[in-house]
Image: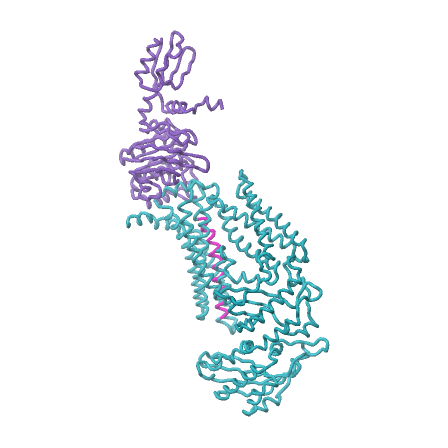
Chain colours: A cyan, B purple
Amino acid sequence: MTSTISSTNKNFAKLYKWAFGRNRALMIVFAVLMAVGIVIDIQSLITISHSRIDNYDDSMGLLGYGSILVAQLGAVCFSVISAIHTFNFLHNKRSTDMFGAVPATRSTLYFSHLLGGITAVSIPFTVGSFIVMALTCRTTQYFMTDVGFILMGIVAIAAVYSFTALIAYCCGTSLDSTIITIGANGIYMGVVAIFMFATCSMIPGLVGSVIFNTPIITLFAPVGFCVFFDAYCTLGQTTAMWTTVIWSILFTAGMILLGNHAAKTRKMETAQNEFNIKWLPIVIKAGISVLAGGFAGMTAVSGQGSSFSNMFIFSFWYIITGFAAFIILHLIFSRGTKVKFLPSLLTYAGTTAAALGLLFAMTTGLGIDTYIPAESNINSITFQSDEMEYKDPENIKTIMELHKLMMEGTLEDISHPYYIGIYYNSNSMYYGTDYETKYPLTFHASFNFKYNKKFGFTTEREYYAYFGRSSTPKYDYEKIEELLKKLYNSDEYKKLSNPELWKAESIKRNGELPVSADINIMVYSEQAERYSHRGNIGLKTDETFLDGLVDALKKDILADKEYYKHKIAAGIYYYDYSNNVYIGDRYYYLNIGYRNDSNNISEMILVQVSENYTNTLNYLRNNGYASELDNPSFSVDDSDNI
Amino acid sequence: MLEIKNITKKFGDKTALENLSFTVPEGSVFGLIGSNGSGKSTLLRIISGVFKPDGGSAEIDGISTYENPDMKEKCFFISDYPYFYNNSTLDSMAAFYKEFYPTWDEAKFEKLCSIFPIKKKDRIINMSKGMQRQAALMVALSVCPKYLMLDEIFDGLDPVVRQLIKKLIMELVSDNKTTVIIASHNLRELEDVCDHIGLIHKGGVVMEKDLDEAKLGIHRVQAVFENELGEGVFNDLDIVSVKKQGRMMTFTIKGDGQAIEKAIQAQKPIYMEMLPLTLEEVFISEMEAVGYDIDNILDK
């Protein structure tokens, strides 16, 4: 057993050293570029330290991870170059004679070259990035981010390297290997993007950007791993970030296994010849034809109206451009030699039919256009951009009904299924003014439905009530407004919109009172921009008083029968164009700022208190704050500035 | 002992070697000859472990060389176009190979460096074809392998260097008991150095023999007869070819020399002489026998 293992791995270290040495020149170039980057960083650090800015630590941190991000991109590029260089011995008949006869197994040859190359790229990247981190990192948060970026950079190098190595084993020449490595990465992301773009253009309601928020976009494009990881990390999309990390590791492991298999089975005589895997160029040709055809088709119909002829125009340009791209690649791969054209042509025809069929089937055949998840399959719905998550079954029903109304209105508006258009909004009419006054909730709602389904699945749709292609809106505004009122009057909404009041720990963390609660009272008149400052209750540390105030507020909010009006007033001022006045009820604005010892961070609760919030108003008056409520210390009239 | 066992190798639809079998005795110098495209280089690549055969195996002492580093360590292969990296020097190539072959003989390498007109620090890629081949051979001889595979090693070498190489190969065989397999079209050089010959054609073995046996098994006889020979007088002889120039007839005949001489003498020739055959003539005769001769090619 020992003898077998030792024989199998024979000369690994020597070949590793050889492969590493072959990358010495590239390593030096990368190291020099990293050094130049570090010098630029030092110069920026001097500039930042001289500017005496307030957020010094943040500026340093941003500079640090911005620099590491650039280093990651460099590492990915060098990984591709180095891998093609390292494995080009497979693409020359004379060098395959030399390496094929070396006393080592093919697996040893593969692993030694792979690891030698990865090490050569990783060393300058890691050393350079740690120097940048040491120069710029000032806080734990940035330290964690920087370390995460560096580790992800190393994973990305391994992923790109193993992917490129696998392609090298599948190809007969370095040119094919380069075309396919670059092409496969670009094509995959491009095809996903164009497919998303096309389907979203055919079925309004689909949220295309969701693709970019999931690792699907880089599933088979390792050059995108670290870029999207960094983006998810920066945007705080933890799930997508960790999924990218896990997938990158699994992808790398898969590529290494496949690479080893390819190394063992590769026919050395394919050097300077054809592809070792016959279907690889076919996939690339098909992918590029879909990409080119889809792009041309979408461009041809952009800004066009909704008609059957649009579908024809799209299909025409898709077929013509896709075919041209296919032929060009066919000629490149065949290098002018006699290659069987008919099977290739049949592949193109099959791919085109499948792609077009799938696209058109998605408009009606697959039911995506009218899909609303079954109620029994829904855990919660995140409705609107304020990210409130509704779980109350009654509210779930209401939101599903809203979804149905918006979907039906939109599909009627675009003459579905004949619509294809990229710029849906910019080519649509805005139904403002009169409708806005009459249906304020509808016009200030973002109809974004995110269904959080069982087993972690989600479905997202988005519609616009204030845009449309028809001269008159096709939406049932009356019904929509009524449903929104119902939703915004629900106890769940009231609690969700005042989380600080219902989450006791916000004010009383672990039963402890805040160190201080600074209470200001503002009063707005019936015109939203005219308000007066009514007084400052000031710092309060009285536990009983604060508890009583919170209880009174909760009681009033739950009893409020017109709570939906708060939705309009709390941040949205609307204007009655017919009477030329702002609309809104008189309300108080309690501004409670508090600071808790445990986190030492100042936080704020803004509570809108209507005239009929008698519990709260009486509570304040009974506790000796009548004058703060009723006597303005100063007034502001901003209405002229609106 | 190197055994070629039922080796088949296909390149796409084309069969390069088909069910090829023969044995190369240990310590012999085996000349692999054959027509263009007969599969000589392919066979050497299979023995060296570069190509994987589609069937059969090349075995050293009963163990296949393919994917076996221990066996490959005993072999060294110089292809028809030896490979060198762009910046390779003799020094760097020596450094590379001495890592992988424990049998590397540094003293021998230094000695070879003093014999051949190649500087150790010069870039090999800039050298002539012949010089590159010499560099490859210097490395190969320094490795002192048990099995040395040489593909068209005499190509591009001047006569002096050819002589030198033959001498060095013979030294290696006698000092190291190395088995050498040389694939070449240069039969004149092979004749000097080989003790065994293998002739392959269209992927199969036509002949595999001791060189002397091969040469003694085929004879050329020049004779002049007083009268026209009657029909079927030499029916008992295995005549490969007959050429007639005036009254002088030249026969190429397979078989025992004495029996041939006796059969011809029976026809009372005015003049008769048994001529020795060169390896090249043996090759042509054997190839004619399998339908590969100049007349056939021209007729096509």
Q: Is residue A482 left or right of residue A258?
A: right
- Is residue A198 something that shows in the picture? no
Q: Is residue B168 above or below residue A219?
A: above
- Magenta span includes A361: no
Residue nearest the viewer, comparing A596 with B6: B6
Question: Does residue A381 appear in the picture of this structure?
Answer: yes
| Image coordinates for residue A142, horizontal then vertical, percent | 46, 68
Q: Quadrant of residue A101?
A: top left
Image spot of residue A355 (x, y percent): 57, 51
Q: Is residue A169 left or right of residue B198?
A: right
Q: In the image, is A326 to the left or to the right of A305?
A: left
The location of residue B286, given as percent across then percent down, is 38, 24
- Most foreground residue, B90 or A499: A499
Quarter holding the N terminus of chain B is top left
Residues in magenta, as a range: A58-85
Q: Is residue A593 left or right of residue A442?
A: left
Res. B239 image quadrant: top left
A73 within the magenta span: yes
* A152, above or below A56, in the image: above
The kind of secondary structure the magenta stretch mainly shows is: helix
Q: How many marks?
A: 0
Vertical arrangement, residue A301 with respect to residue A96, above or below: below
Q: From the top left corner, tell me how far across and down residue A151 is, in percent.
A: 43, 61
Q: Residue furthest right?
A: A578
Judge whether A430 appears above or below B1 on screen: below
Q: Residue sitting at 65 percent across and 74 percent down?
A: A440
The residue lying toward the viewer, choosing from B274 and B54, is B54
